[in-house]
Structures are given as C-alpha cells and as structure tokens.
C-alpha cells in the first residue's frame, strides 16, 4: 500500500527578514505607565481580597464619622474643642488604626509578597528579560505597581477623615483647599507614603529571596512583635529616645507627630504617650526616624536592584 | 555578506549549585544562517542558549552576541528573539492578548502592538478564532506556536529557539518547519535546539552536537545526518486508539516495528523506524486519513545517544 506524501499547509510569512523598524518605539515613560497599570490589574485580579479591603475601609469610614461626631464632650462645639491638627492626629492614631494599621500591613503583604516570586515560578522572567526592557525598568514597574495599589487604600482614610473633620469644623468648600488646613492632609499623605515605600521595598526584597509568599507574612508579623518586645525592655531602663533604636515600627508615631507639629507635652497629656517623656523632642525623634526610614528604603532598593541585576533565569 | 559570527563562546564553563556542570570548556561560533544545536536531554543545550541570550552568566570564559556581553543586556533583544524551552505564559490571557502585551513590553505603541501580534499570529498559523481563546485551553502544539510567535515580535535578526518542537503534534512540527525554512530564505538567522536531528535537518545548514556539557562535533547537516541515521530511530506516540494506529503504521515501509504499551485508556505506541525522514513525512497523512487523535508525540533521543556513544568511543 502506497501513500501520498503529505505537505503541510503552506506557511505564510509577512515582512520577516532584515527589516529594521524605521519607527521609533514609544517613549519608555509610556511603556512604564502601561506596564505599571497592567501589573496593578494583575494584583487586583482576584476580586475577593479587593472587596475585603474596600469593605474594611467602608467600615472604618462609618466608625470614623461616628467617632468624630461623638468626640467632643456634650455641649462643647467643635470650634472650642482641641485644635484641628490635634483632632486629626488623634483620629489617625486612636480610632482602631484606620491608616497604617493591620489592614495596610495585610495589603502590602497581599500585593507585594508574591509579585517577584510569582514571576520567578511562572517563568515570566524569561518573557520580561528577553525583551528590550532593562531590569531596572522591570523593578521600577513592580515597585510602583505595589506601592500605588497599597497607597490607594492607605491614603483613603487620611482623605476621608480630613473631609469628615472639615465638615465637623464647619469648613466651607474653599477651606478644604486652604494651605492652613491642607498642609495637614499633605503631611499625613507624606507620612503614609514614607511608611508604604518602606514596607513595599522590604516586602519586595523578601519576595525576591523567598520561595513562598507566606514566609514574607511571617517576617512581617514577627518584626513589629520583636520591636515592641525590645521597646518594652528599653522603656523601663529609661533609655533616652528608645524608639530610634527599635526602628520604624515604634517610631512612626513620632514621625506623624513631627509632620503635624504636635508638641511633646501634648503627646504626654492629651494622648497618654508616657513614653514621650523619654524623648529629647518630637522633631528630633521624628526627623531621625524619618531619616532612618529613608536610609532603609535606599538600602532595600539597592540590594533589590543588585539582586535583580545579577539574577539568573535558570 | 560579512562572515562575522553572531554568537561567540570562548572556553565557556557554567555550573549550577550542587556542582552540576551545564557547560564545560565550550568554544563555539554561530554564524549567519540556521544552526541546529543537537544533544540528548540534559546535554547542555538549554544552558548554551540561556548563556547566549544572557539569561545566565558563565562562571568561566566569555560569551558575546552581536559583539556584546549578553548578560542582563536587554538591548540585544531589539535584534534577538528568544523562545524558552519551558512554558512561560500569562495563561489567563488569550493568545492574542498575550502577544499584544509582550509587544507592548517590547516597546510598541498600542496600535502597533495589535498589528505586531496579528502579524506573528499569521506567521505561526494561529490567526483565526483560536487566537481569541485563553491560553490555558491550548493544546501543546498551539502553545508551542504561541511561544515561537512571541520570539518573532519586533522582527529579530536572530531567533534563538529552545526545543520549539518539543511535545508538538506532527502537523505543528511540519508547519513550524516550513516557517523556519521561509525565514531562512528571508535572511533570518536561527539557532535552534533539539534532541532529534530530523526536526532541524530540513532547514539547518550547520549542526553542533553537544553532550554532557561539551561540544562534541560540528559540521554540515549531511555528515551529521549520515552519522545518526545509521542507527535505528524510536518514536513515542500517545493516543487513545493505539491498536488502530498500529494497524496503519505497521504496513508502512519506513516502520520496522510497533509496540503497544499499557492497553488501557492512556495507551501509547513505540515505533521503530529505519527511515525516520520518510516516516515523519507520512505520519501526518495517516493521522488525517484515519482521524486518530494524537495526544503526545516525541522522538526519543536513543538514536542520538548511540551516536554520542560512538563518537566518544572513537
């Protein structure tokens, strides 16, 4: 029995060859924005964590409004209550941590813990690193996507507390934009940015080394616990400025106080921060802590870049 | 045309953790045209290609591609397209979305990226409804086509393809073979790895045999083919109708014997051929005529192993 030889269907070739692109590629900034947006969509793709985080923010919002309305003792109008910035500060630190609390740590963990390990395990490194995309650009995309995703949630309470407080203090619409008040919102957003950049760079660094995302979670939970244990040892010893030695987790409150220009005595008398008696001044501890955080961000990102730069796609 | 080599390996040694040697004192040059990199599984082919594309770096020696060190040098990928061996997909996307996204990573604008995805899909014969299906639903053959397509994004001068035929059905193999032939005619250089000579002999002008991390032989395809086809060739076919397929195969002059293993649902055939070239040309016709579906198809490297044994023992 003889058979015909099968010829496969004819291949079609369009313009392949030594064709050089006469057109230039789009600017790197546009590509960066596109890739960052794609990465954000990827982080937000599983819907239920997104709904959980949004729900938590809404619940905090309701509690905030109720908390603000019930804050002044009855009969005392808001204008005669504590100054705006103090009230803002108190809502941020005393109302179940609506900002930079557990939710935000969970957010950073969720968004960033597997962002690099996922690419490593899925083989996506070989897709990215066989394109004219530098490793620095790749890292910048990942970092920006995680930071933006988390910040969109983290900044939300800062904004709605500002708006709710403004309403309580009888702000006219134009008052919200007056620098006299707006500076406090900017300070709080800046504080949030600082902390989220620190957490994001730390989590991405861990993600580049660890094989499983939940390892990152363990470290994220362990660090504040260890910090508070060390802090509780230092305070009875009356070590001056103990929070500086313990690190960002203990000192962040002083950064916020420094940004909002809250006095040391106010911290002790109005907020019961008796540890504040050990500090030299709010501005000293705040500025030192902010500097340490900036230095840590630089170190984390530097190590991360060296790590990605020398990474082999095995 | 200048005869400057595209890729140069100078005394390159690469080892992995655990003292596993990937490549051992390998010196080679890859020129223009199509070069087949042949060797059994674990011979060092993927290591060779990863070194050439800068996915990994050599422990000893130097690698250059287009005259530059490729490691983490993503600029070369304006000229080089790389198809990795392992599946690396964003499998929740459709084939078209995947290629559009990679085109955007490459630096194309949105409009150009769509055109580019369409172009490469046409080349690999997926420019139909299948392109709009999610990759997760693709057969192995379709995945291979998409992988090859992504390597062609940006019209590279040099394609580096790591086992593009692995696991693909005979029709896909034949189709891609035709594509590479056409590319060759258009002046595109290709470095393609395989563990079976017949897969590359139709279009490769030069063959490099690699074994246990060492370059064992190199030369024109005719000489290598003669060397290899002196030995019997074994082919593995996984099908739900092994007996029916065996009936049709055994009457073929190119088939020496057919063996059925595991008589259940997941049965497979082992075919021994003395004339594999003829066998690979007639098999697609048999499959089309009989309508027997093939789930997996592999040319095992026993025959190549025999050649290597012969070369080593000389």
Image (cartoon, coloured by chain):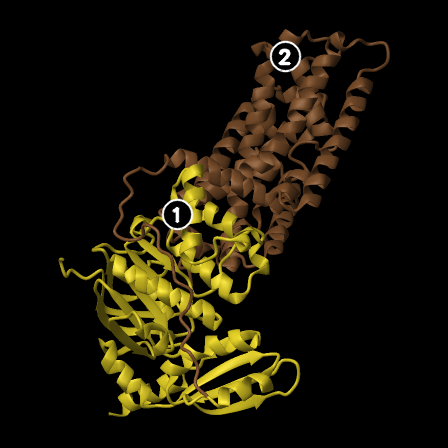
* Residue identifier under label 1: A135
Viewer-closest of A46 and A300: A46
In which quadrant is the N terminus of chain B drawn? bottom left
Viewer-closest of B176 and A194: B176
Vertical relation: B213 (above or below) B111: below
The residue sitting at the left extreme is B2
Residue B25: x and y in percent read 25, 74
Look at chain A in the picture and name its colour. Answer: brown
Mark 2: give few (<14), some (14-19) or many (20+) Cα within 10 Å: some
Secondary structure beneath dot 2 equals helix
Vertical relation: B96 (above or below) B174: above
Residue at 47% from the left image edge and 46% from the top image edge: B101
Vertical relation: B256 (above or below) A80: below
In the rendered view, does B289 fall on the left or right side of A305? right
Residue at 72% from the left image edge and 10% from the top image edge: A169
In the rendered view, does A219 fall on the left or right side of B231? right
In which quadrant is the C terminus of chain B drawn? bottom left
Vertical relation: B162 (above or below) B76: below
Residue A8: x and y in percent read 42, 68
Residue at 24% from the left image edge and 80% from the top image edge: B222
* Residue B52 visible here: no
* Label 1, label 2: how far apart the Cα atoms are: 42 Å
Look at chain B in the picture and name its colour. Answer: yellow
Residue A137, picture quadrant: top left
Q: Residue A176: which disc? A: 2
- To which chain does the residue with label 2 belong? A
Secondary structure beneath dot 1 equals helix
In the rendered view, does A85 fall on the left or right side of B128? right
């Amino acid at each position: 029995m003889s058979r015909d030889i099968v010829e496969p269907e004819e291949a079609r070739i369009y313009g392949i060859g030594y064709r050089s692109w006469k057109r230039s590629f789009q600017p790197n900034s546009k590509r960066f924005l596109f890739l960052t947006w794609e990465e954000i969509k990827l982080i937000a793709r599983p819907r239920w964590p997104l709904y959980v985080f949004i729900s938590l923010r809404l619940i905090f919002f309701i509690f905030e409004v109720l908390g603000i309305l019930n804050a002044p003792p009855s009969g005392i109008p808001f204008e005669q209550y504590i100054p705006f910035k103090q009230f803002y500060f108190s809502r941020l630190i005393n109302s179940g941590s609506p900002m930079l609390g557990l939710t935000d740590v969970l957010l950073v963990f969720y968004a960033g813990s597997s962002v690099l390990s996922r690419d490593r395990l899925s083989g996506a490194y070989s897709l990215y690193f066989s394109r004219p995309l530098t490793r620095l650009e790749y890292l910048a995309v990942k970092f920006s996507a995680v930071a933006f995703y988390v910040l969109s949630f983290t900044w939300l309470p800062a904004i709605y507390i500002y708006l709710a407080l403004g309403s309580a203090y009888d702000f006219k619409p134009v008052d919200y934009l007056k620098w006299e008040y707006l500076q406090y919102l900017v300070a709080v957003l800046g504080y949030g940015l600082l902390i989220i950049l620190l957490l994001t760079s730390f989590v991405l660094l861990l993600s580049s080394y660890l094989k499983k995302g939940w390892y990152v979670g363990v470290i994220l939970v362990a660090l504040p616990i260890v910090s508070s244990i060390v802090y509780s040892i230092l305070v009875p010893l009356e070590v001056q400025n103990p929070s500086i030695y313990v690190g960002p987790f203990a000192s962040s409150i002083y950064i916020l106080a420094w940004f909002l220009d809250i006095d040391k005595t106010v911290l002790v008398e109005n907020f019961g921060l008796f540890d504040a008696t050990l500090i030299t001044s709010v501005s000293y501890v705040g500025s030192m802590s902010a500097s340490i955080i900036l230095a840590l961000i630089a170190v984390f990102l530097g190590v991360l870049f060296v790590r990605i730069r020398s990474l082999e796609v095995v | 045309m200048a005869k400057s080599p595209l890729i140069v390996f100078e005394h390159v040694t690469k080892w992995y953790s655990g003292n596993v040697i990937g490549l051992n004192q390998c010196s080679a040059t890859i020129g223009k045209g199509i070069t087949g990199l042949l060797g059994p599984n674990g011979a060092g082919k993927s290591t060779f290609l990863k070194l050439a594309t800068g996915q990994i770096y050599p422990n000893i020696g130097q690698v250059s591609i287009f005259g530059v060190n490729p490691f983490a040098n993503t600029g070369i990928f304006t000229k080089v397209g790389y198809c990795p061996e392992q599946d690396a997909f964003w499998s929740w996307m459709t084939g078209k979305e995947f290629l559009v996204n990679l085109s955007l990573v490459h630096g194309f604008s949105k409009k150009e990226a769509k055109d580019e995805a369409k172009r490469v899909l046409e080349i690999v014969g997926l420019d139909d409804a299948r392109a709009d299906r999610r990759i997760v639903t693709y057969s192995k053959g379709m995945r291979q086509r998409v992988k090859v397509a992504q390597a062609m994004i940006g019209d590279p001068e040099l394609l580096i393809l790591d086992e593009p035929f692995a696991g693909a059905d005979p029709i896909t193999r034949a189709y891609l073979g035709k594509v590479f032939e056409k590319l060759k005619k258009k002046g595109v250089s290709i470095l393609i790895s395989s563990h079976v000579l017949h897969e590359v002999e139709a279009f490769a002008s030069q063959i490099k045999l690699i074994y246990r991390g060492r370059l064992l032989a190199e030369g024109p395809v005719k000489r290598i083919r003669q060397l290899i086809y002196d030995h019997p060739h074994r082919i593995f076919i996984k099908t739900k109708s092994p007996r029916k397929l065996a009936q049709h195969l055994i009457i073929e002059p190119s088939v020496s014997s057919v063996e059925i293993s595991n008589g259940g649902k997941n049965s497979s055939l082992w075919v021994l051929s003395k004339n594999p070239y003829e066998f690979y040309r007639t098999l697609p016709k048999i499959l089309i005529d009989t309508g027997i579906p093939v789930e997996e198809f592999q040319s095992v490297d026993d025959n190549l192993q025999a050649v290597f044994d012969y070369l080593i023992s000389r």
